[in-house]
Every structure is written in structure tokens, then in C-alpha cells.
Image (cartoon, rainbow, N blue to C red):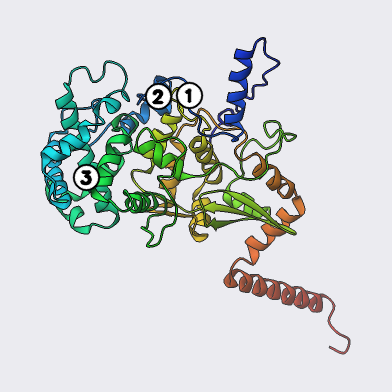
Amino acid sequence: MENESEFVNLLVEIPGTVNDKFDSVAKEWQSCMTGDETIKRHASVRRMEKVPKCLLQTKKGRRNSDCYQPAVVSLGPYHHNKPGLAQAENYKLITLQEFCLSTKKHKDELYKDVFEVVHDARKCYIDGSTDAYSDREFCQMMLRDGCFIVFLMEGLTYGESKLLLTNEYLGLTEILNITRDIFLLENQIPFVVLQVLLKLKFPHDEGESILNGLFNYLNRGVVLAKIDKKVLKFIQPPLHLLELYRSYFILPSTTKKRTDYNYVKGNRYFASATELKAKWIFLDQAMDDNMTFHRRGWYGEVKVTRRAVSSYTKAIYLNMIAYEMCPHNPNDFRISSYVRVMKSLIMKESDVEELRNRKILVHCLGRDDEVVKMFDQIDIPPVNLFMFNQLRYEMGMLHNTKIKAWFWELFVTYFSSPWKALGLFIGTALLVLTLVQTHYTIKPPKGH
């Protein structure tokens, strides 16, 4: 269990500002943190940042440093030509050829299409990081990397033959690492490049179905046959694939927000899944990407969206958290807040079992304690104080009831299964018979 200090968040009250400039900044920050405006166009130019150094300087950050580094394939300039990733560079040429065959376009035609957005793509990276590449070299990099990503997305969703080809050239174990690699913060290519390729590959829906299938596979462990969610209907075009997945991952809370409940002084985090159950607050699977609370008279029900946990989940979570800490990005901390909640819900193996039984969590890590360890290893510096504020308040109304807890403890101990109930009945019957026998031994009936 984590130290109490890890759950203490900083609550800042901003007093009246001196001038209009600071007042506007304060209002912008407040609107972001309360969820009223989760995506805002900033005056500063957004860049594809690297992992903030503060995340790598903590004890957990140093242990998780490998989660920010590509294991199989480099995408973009930050890790280009890194030793140990050469085999994937050769495989990119195969995926490029497959893209040409499937779109019936020559490589030179694809090059011209991508070259039209090269200037915008180059501006997405940190100043100086692409100076070593001419426009032609940079365009070739974007084309190869983009075709590789599209090829992998097809393979993970609907293209079994593409996964077999990847397995033949790179090995089955590397497919999981590649899935992890395309969602690393420092291993992204600008989404404007992917948009060009998706339009060429899927002219009717511009890749909507493939992106939906990929994100549902990552979230729920299955590719849903019918998906109505519009991934590409965004307010502001995403900077890269990681940002798009983050916006798809979970919605900000849509419930009415309370301003009169200070959970920093009250409940600072959720109780675990089994503790909530003991308080008659039951978890159930949500049908959307949100987390809501419903009061059902004398008990409560928390709707939690289904999530899949695999060997690459920790790396993806860490990189989305790192992205939220970068400057000039949407700063509602929705992923950080969600992971903090999950860390609170999952404190021991029985919590994982409860989430599995409720079909909220599915994992392929072998043992339930591996899921506990995974969430414990994730460090969460910032959280959105308001994202689940109303949810915490409503749960707190039912949470602090000792009579319910005692009754539930009695039920779990003695009546949670027919065998426990039968054992209690037999034990009680034996106790009663023993007492009766003892009574008649001491005071036998008259006439005996």
C-alpha cells in the first residue's frame, strides 16, 4: 500500500489578480482544471515534446525509464538510427511496398502526397531535432514510419495475414513490443502525416473504423464489430496518435460539479473495490468511456468502463501521463486522474478478482498480484481535483455507514457461498446439540 503522502494533492486558491493578463491566465487554468474546457487552442506553438525530466528523477521514474524507450522500432527523429532497432527499419520497406500494392499507387506518388505536409510535420518537433535531415530525407522517414503504423493498426484489428507477416520477420513476442512502441511519447510522428495515408488507404471513412478497432482492442481486449464512436471528430486536430488515443481513452466527468465539497479535507481517494463492496457500493461495467455513480436506495452502484491490462499497458499509461505533463498540451490530467482512481481501487489481489468478476477488468498477466504490482509501479504526480469530485461526494454519502459494513462482513464471512452457509449451519447445530447434551448430563430429566 502506498504512503499517505502520495495521495495528498496540492489545492491552490488563486486570489484576485493584479491585472487583466494574470486574470485571464487564472481563468484559463481554472476552466481546464474544472473540466469546463478540456481542449483549448494555446497561443504558443505545440511541439512533440520529450519525457519531462522530473518524471525520470523519482525512484519509480528511474525504475520505469525503459517504458519511455522503443524496444523494437523507432518512429520519428528522436530515436532514429538507434542501435538495436535496425531490423525493424528493413521491415518498414516491406510495409511501404504493401501500402503501394493495396492503394495501387507508386512510391513516388505517395512521396509527393506526404511531401505536401512535410513543412507542417517538421514544425511539430522540437527546434533543432530535425536539422540533420533534408526535406527529402525527412519525407522518406515520415512515409516509411507512417506506412509501418498503418500496417500494424490493420494487423491488430482485422488483418490476421499482416500479423503473420510481422511474426515471420520480427517474431511473435515483438508484436507486443511494437504495439507498445507506437504509443511512446518520444516515438510519435505528426498526425497530419497519418491523415494523408489513412485517406489514401481508406477513402470512404478516412481510417475511422481502423482507429476505432485499434483503440477498442487496447481498451477492452476485443475488436468490436459495430462501433459508432467518431474518433476523428475532434475540436482541435491531434498532434499525434498518442494524443488521439488519450482523448478516446476516457471522457471527463459529465456530472454536475460540486464546488462546496472539499475532498482534500475529506475523502482524498477512492476506497478499494472490496472495501467499497463492504460499504454496499458495488462496481459494475459501464457501456461508455466514463465513470459514474448511481444511488439505488440503500446501496450504490459505480459504473466503471471495461479495461484490458497487458504487458504493454503500463508503458502506455506512463507515456500518456508524461504527455499530460508537457507544456502547451491539454492539461485536464484525465489519464492521471483515472489511473489514480484505479490505483485506489486495486490495492490487493481480491480487488482484482472483484473487478474481473464484474467484467470491468480483463488481463493477461497471469496472476492477479501482477496487476496490483503494475499499478503500484506507476507514479502519479498531478491529478485533476475536480474530475471525479461529484462522484466522490455521492459515494461518500453511502461510504461512512458502519452498520452496513458490519452486516456485509458477516455476510461475506458466513454466507458468501453455500458451503460457508452449510458449514455455519452444521457448526451451529453441533454447538446446540453439545449444549443440550451437557445440560441433560448435569441435570438429567426426572425419572432417569
Q: Are marks 2 and 1 in contact (CB under 8 Å)?
A: yes
Residue depicted at 46% across the width and 30% down the height: 324
Identify the residue at the far right of this view.
446
Residue depicted at 40% across the width and 45% down the height: 232
Residue located beneath label 2 in the image: 46
Instruction: Tell me if 161 is positioned left or right of 54 in this view.
Output: left
Residue located beneath label 3 in the image: 174
Query: Secondary structure beneath disc 2?
Result: loop
In the rendered structure, find residue 42 and report the number of the disc placed on it: 1
Along the viewing direction, whichever of 213 and 109 lies nearer the viewer: 109
Q: Amino acid at mark 2?
A: Arg
Q: Could you say where residue 372 lies in the image, as x and y percent from the top left?
A: 46, 44
Along the viewing direction, whichever of 309 and 100 lies nearer the viewer: 100
Identify the residue at the far bottom of this view.
447
Q: Earlier in the sequence, mark 3 or mark 2?
A: 2
Q: Nearer the viewer, mark 3 or mark 1?
A: 1
Q: Amino acid at mark 1?
A: His
